[in-house]
Image (cartoon, rainbow, N blue to C red):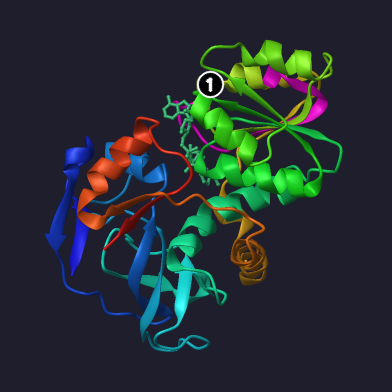
Amino acid sequence: MKAIQIQQTGGPEVLELVDLPIPVPGPGQVLIRIETTGLNFIEIYFRKGQYKAALPIVPGSEAAGTVEELGPGVQGFSAGELVASTAVIGSYAEYALVPAAQLVKVPAGLSPEKAAAAMLQGMTAHYLAYSTYPLKSGETALIHAGAGGVGLLLTQIAKRIGARVITTVSTAAKAELSREAGADEVILYSEQDFEVEVKRLTDGKGVDVVYDSVGKTTFEKSLNCIRPRGMLALFGGSSGAVPPFDPIQLSGKGSLYLTRPTLWHYIATRAELEQRAGEVLGWAASGELKLRTEHIYPLHEAAQAQTDMEERKTTGKILLEP
Ligand code: NDP
């Protein structure tokens, strides 16, 4: 099968197209034929060596595909079914193994592209808005990178709950997309000081929660935008890692809560995975959750796809198709 492999960490050029044997499912595993792979920023961290992995490795963890073969002991799935997962073992490939415990069925009427696009970013937006800081109607959220993959979905979910949404984006075109997703106020943080703008838009009160995936360049000002006892949910570092931080600052800024959540702890049980994936895929199938999937690259252009993601050229979801 064709796959993208990394032999050594580095720039996009280390993503090489290779021929590998089709893997054989072990106990509890399912072999899927991949229809669409979802790209995520974390694969760039692994490629660069910022996150460590034993090499060589086929990157990627999110995909939708059809069931090809069940490993020993697997029940509940059958060959040919459309399924999706965020725990694929190397999804930059034509075939890959998935632990059956991490696999979900795709509801009727939802394409593999939409399913792959919805899973990781959709469940992330879901846990952030419903579990990390359970947003309530009438509250105000600040969402950074509002035109990004998670940003567009989180905005829609926050609006669905009835919250007021302020987003930040870097360009006028992205501002338009963020507004289309439902943002009430959009700040061009490339031109305006978002802290000043948030204070102006909230009459100096600050927001109830900041969902911050940008990290290094936004962290400090994000803390300054929060009302007393509000929360900073720092869930990514697209601009780089946040430097070491003294928790006493949380006290000075209003007894704030700071959390650094990750999806895996919010889909740790089968029940929670099924509930989150079921809602997100269900909303995607009914059209209630709009997914942008205009960036689809062939598998062999994985390096270009990652480059475009890193250079902030894309909006919504980036997909690879074998
Ligand atoms: P996005 O589509 O949001 O892409 C990243 C965006 O970040 C860019 O489009 C850009 O938007 C903004 N950005 C700001 N500064 C920079 C910079 N210096 N370099 C690159 N981008 C920058 O990606 P995703 O939606 O896939 O993921 C968003 C973040 O959330 C990532 O950091 C990812 O690792 C994290 N994540 C965390 C999860 C968790 O559970 N903790 C799960 C899923 C994702 P703009 O141009 O408007 O500034």
**Three-letter amino acid code of the residue under disc 1:** Pro
Q: Residue at x 30, y 44 (%)?
A: 305
From the image, tell me which residue sits under label 1: 244
Q: Quadrant of the C terminus?
A: bottom left
Tell me if residue 19 is in the magenta stretch: no
Residue at x 83% of width, y 28% of height: 229
- For the question of whether residue 50 can be seen, the reply is no
> In the drawing, does residue 185 fall left or right of residue 121?
right
| Residue at figure coordinates x 39%, y 82% from the top left | 27
Magenta span: 223-241
> Is 194 situated above or below 316?
above
Residue 272 lies, in percent from the top left, at: 66, 65
> How many numbered marks appear?
1
Work out whether 46 lies above or below 194: below
Rendering coords of residue 266 (x, y %): 63, 55
Residue 206 sits in which quadrant? top right
- Vertical comparison of 270 with 81: above or below: above
Mark 1 element type: loop
Q: Position of residue 55 (x, y in %)?
A: 22, 51
Q: Position of residue 108 (x, y in %)?
A: 56, 77
